[in-house]
Image (cartoon, rainbow, N blue to C red):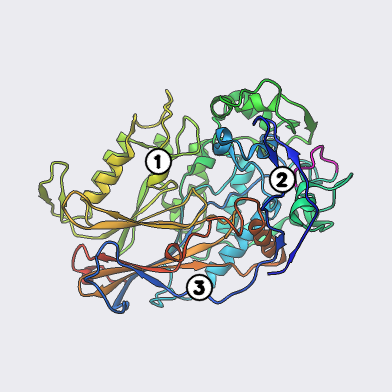
Amino acid sequence: MRSSGRAALTTQRRLGAGSVLTQGSLAAYREVAELEGEPHLVRRDLVGDSSQGSVDPVRPIAAIAHLTDLHVTDAESPARFEYINREYADPRVRELLPMQRAQEVLNAHAIDAMIRTVNQVNGGPWTGTPLQLVATTGDAVDNTQENELRAAMALLDGGVVEPNSGGPEYEGVQERNWPDDFFWKPDGAAEGHDFYTAALGHPHIPGLLERALQPFEAAGISLPWLGCHGNHEEVCQGVGVVTPALAAAMVRTHKPFRLPEGIDPDTALETFVRQPEVFMAGPHVDVTPDPARRPFDIQDFVDAHLESESLPRGHGFTEQNLDDGSAYYVHDTPSVRFITLDTACPAGGAEGCITAFQLHWLERRLEEVHSTFRSRDGTTVSTPHHDRLVVILSHHGYDSLTNPRTHPETRGSTHTDRKNLLAALLRFKNVVLWLNGHIHANRVRARLDASGGGGGFWEVTTGSIVDWPCQGRIVELADSGDGLLAIACTMIDHEGSELAALHRELAGNAPIAGFDSDRAGSPLDRNVILLARAPFALAKAHSD
C-alpha cells in the first residue's frame, strides 16, 4: 500500500467535556492492494479433536451467497444527523454512530459491483456447486426512506438507480460551502482544509459528487434472492422512532448542521430514540424538499418485495406478512429450509429483539422439518415429518439481541429473552447454521449445546457492503463423510468500477472502522470450513 502524510488538525468535540479529536495514531491515507486469496482453515469446535485429517466435500448439498447491510443511502436527506459524528469518542452516543461516511455517495455503485461479481460466480469455490440463491440479512437501506427503498429494489432486481434526491445538484455535508470542516469534501473546502484532507490525507477529486449521483443501470441479482427486515428499515438512522414530527421534517427543507443547545449527553441516546426531531432544532441549511423522502413502514417494505418481478415471488415475504404487519417467513428448497426472522425493535434502538409470539412460530416451523426433536422438558418427541437441514437468517445475531426497549405497539407480543431463542435452536438438531449481519464485521462462532444433548450449530456473521472490508460471502454445505457436515465459507471481493473501487478505498481509510479495525475479523472468521455432526443421514439432503 502507498501512504502519504498530511498535517494534523485538531477538532473540539461538543458533548464530552475536555476531549479532542487529533491525528494521533490515525494512519495516513492508503490504497487497497490486491493480494492472493486466503486458504480455508478448518474449524472443529463442534466435533472435537477426534475428527482429524483432510476435509473433502463428498457430496454437495447447497451453495448460496450471503450479502448484508447494503445501506442504500440518501446522502442529502434533512433527516440525517451527520454532525453527531463529532461525538465519536463519547460512549454515551456510540449507538448513534456512524451518521455519515466519506464513501456514502458511492455506495450504490459498490452494491452494484458486488452483485455483478456474485452473478459471475459459476460455482462455489469448494464444491463447484452452482449457487442456488442469494440471502440478504437486512439494512438494505440506511434511513427508512421510500426513495432509498426504491433504489435498493432497483439494485437487487435490476433497473435504473437514481442516487440523487432533492435538487439537481448535491446538497449535503460534503459540498464545498457546507458550514462544517469535519467531513471530506472531494471538491475541496471553500476555505482552508476539511479534517479528512488535512489530517487523514484524503484526496481532492473534483466533480466526484456530480458523477456519483448520476442515474445508472444496475445489473440486479441473476439468482433468486431472499429479503430481510433490519433496524435501518424500521427506525430513523437505525435508532430513532419515526415520529409524525420527524416524518414531516424528512420531506421538508431544514437540514441541521450542529447540535441544538441543551442536549444532555447523559440522555442524548434515549432522546434520539424517542424524539429524533429534537436533534433538528439547531442551526440548519435550507435544502430542496423532496416528497420521495417520506418514511416507509413494514407493510410498505413487504409490499415492495411482493411487487418485485424477480424470483422468488415476494423474496420470501407473503401476503400474510402484508396482512399482519410481520416480516418473518419460511423458504424451502429441496435440501434446506431457510427461516428468516425479524429482529428489528419497533421501540427504537440499534440492537435487536425477538418476541415470544415469533419464537413460538419459529418452534412450529422447526418441528415441520424434524423427524424427532427435544422438547423443552428434555424428552424426545417423534413426528411424522421428514428431516431437512435448517439455516436461520436474521439481521441481528445472538450477541446483538439485547434491546430492552418495549413499546405499546410492539408487534406480536412482548419480548422474550434471547437465551430462550438460543435454547430453542439448540433443541432442534437439524439447525446447522445461523447467518446474520448488523455488526458490520466478519465473525464465526460455534454455538455449542451445553445441556448434555450434544451437538450445536454455527453462527456466521458477514461484514457489510457499506463499510470495510466491503465483502460478501459464499456459503456451501456438503456431506463430508464419516457422519460429518461441512460448511465452507469464502469471502467475496467485488470487481468494481472506478467509483466502486474508490468506495472501498475510502471505507478502508475510515477512522476507527477502516484498515486497522477488527471489521475484517481474524482468518478464522473469513475463509473457513466449519465441521458439525450430521444431524441425520445426509444422503437425504443432497442437492439435485
Mark 1 neighbour class, 10 Å CA radius: few under 14, some 14 to 19, many 20 or more: many
Please give the residue where the numbered disc 3 appears in the rendered image.
121
Please give the residue where the numbered disc 2 appears in the rendered image.
22
Residue at image point 50% right, 73% down: 121
Specify whether 8 is left or right of 364.
right
Which numbered marker is on residue 401? 1
Seen from the viewer's position, the closer of residues 364 and 286 is: 286
Which residue type carries mark 1?
Leu
Which residue type carries mark 2?
Thr
Residue 478: name its quadrant.
bottom left
Which residue type carries mark 3?
Val
Ranked by sequence position, the earlier of labels 2 and 3 is 2
Residue at image point 79% right, 39% down: 180
Q: Looking at the picture, does residue 67 appear above or below residue 195?
A: below
Secondary element under disc 2, as helix, strand or loop, is loop
* Residue 27 location (% of width, % of height): 68, 57
Q: Which residues are magenta?
A: 177-183
- Quadrant for the C terminus, please: bottom left
* Residue 171 location (% of width, % of height): 78, 42
Residue found at the very far right of the displayed protein: 191
Q: Looking at the picture, does residue 57 appear above or below residue 377?
A: below
- Quadrant for the N terminus, please: bottom right
